[in-house]
Image: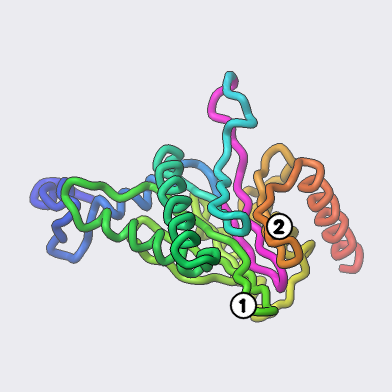
Amino acid sequence: MARGSSAGYDRHITIFSPDGRLYQVEYAFKAIKTSGLTSVGVRGADSCVVLTQRKVPDKLHDPDSVTNMYNITANIGLVMTGMVADARSKVQRLRQEAAEFKHNNGYEMPVSYLAKRAADMAQVYTQHANMRPLGIAMIIIGIDVEGERKIPQLFQCDPAGYYVGYKATSAGQKEQEAKNFLEKRYKAEPNPSLSYDDTVQLALACLQNVLGSDLKASDVEASVVRADALKFTKLTPDEIEAHLTALAERDDDVAARD
């Protein structure tokens, strides 16, 4: 973007440029991509999974303290992609919102309502001159309980305050490549009834494909929520390794048949 006559619109978050753009909001989207991470979320028949690359930025950091996965309630969690400090601030606010909702209503906040509240807060940051958009994209997963039904839910929210439900989605540096991979998968079978293992392995296959190299368990951070457990849980390295092995064996079987 050229400076000069557009510089005023560049500096002020609340002013539209003549061509209808909010530059600071666009920069927030760029901050997500410059994080260097790619995250993937997939919704199955009875589960949801989110995963992201695990990168420790400094050799002196304790790897166990570096995470992009956060639980909001017992059965709702998310992966944040972008600026870590912004992510932690947003997580604290969402946990407060969820706790107040349960206190006032006597039941857990639905996943769709949590996504709406996250989007509402993000949208407010685009309206006021004394604020800035948060440089994060969040992929939210959880299980909504409606009587006897337990419904997996997957939502994504962006810095502009837009949110929508997904079958599968991605955020981060290679977001578009990942979405292209997922779209091809769902074009072949628009409404697949994915088992838990298939859900996890589809997400891993997507990330592995866009990164162009075989993943190791230490390269990935993954969390799941299942209808039979109703708990947002991080997968252990051994569990991730087991899924990667199963994925590799399945690919070998396909190659052998071809």
User: In front here: 230 or 14?
Assistant: 230
Observer-nearest of 5 and 192: 192
- Residue appearing at x 76%, y 47% in the figure: 240
Q: Let me know if residue 42 is in the magenta part.
A: yes
Query: Dot 2 corresponds to which residue?
Result: 205
- Which range is magenta? 39-59
Question: x and y percent of residue 194 in the render?
Answer: 74, 71
For the residue labelled by badge 1, is the local secondary structure a helix, a strand or a loop?
A: strand
Tell me where residue 180 appears, x and y as whole percent: 57, 65
Circle 2 packing at 10 Å, graded few (<14), some (14-19), many (20+), is many
Farthest-out residue, top: 60
Question: How does the figure colour the protein chain or chains?
Answer: rainbow
- Relative placement, left or right, of 99 versus 212 is left
For the C terminus, the image quarter is bottom right
> What is the x, y in percent for residue 36?
50, 41
User: Which residue occupies the foreground of this view, 160 or 176?
Assistant: 160
Inspect this view and state whether residue 122 appears.
yes
The local crowd at label 1, few if under 14, some if 14 to 19, many if 20 or more residues have their Cα within 10 Å, is: few
The residue at which mark 1 appears reads as 146
Q: Is residue 197 above or below residue 5?
A: below
Q: Amino acid at mark 1?
A: Glu
Residue found at x 12% / y 63%: 18
66, above or below 177, in the image: above
Residue 232 part of the magenta-drawn span: no
> Residue 10 bears which disc, if any?
none
Instruction: Say which of 63 and 226 sits in front.
Output: 226
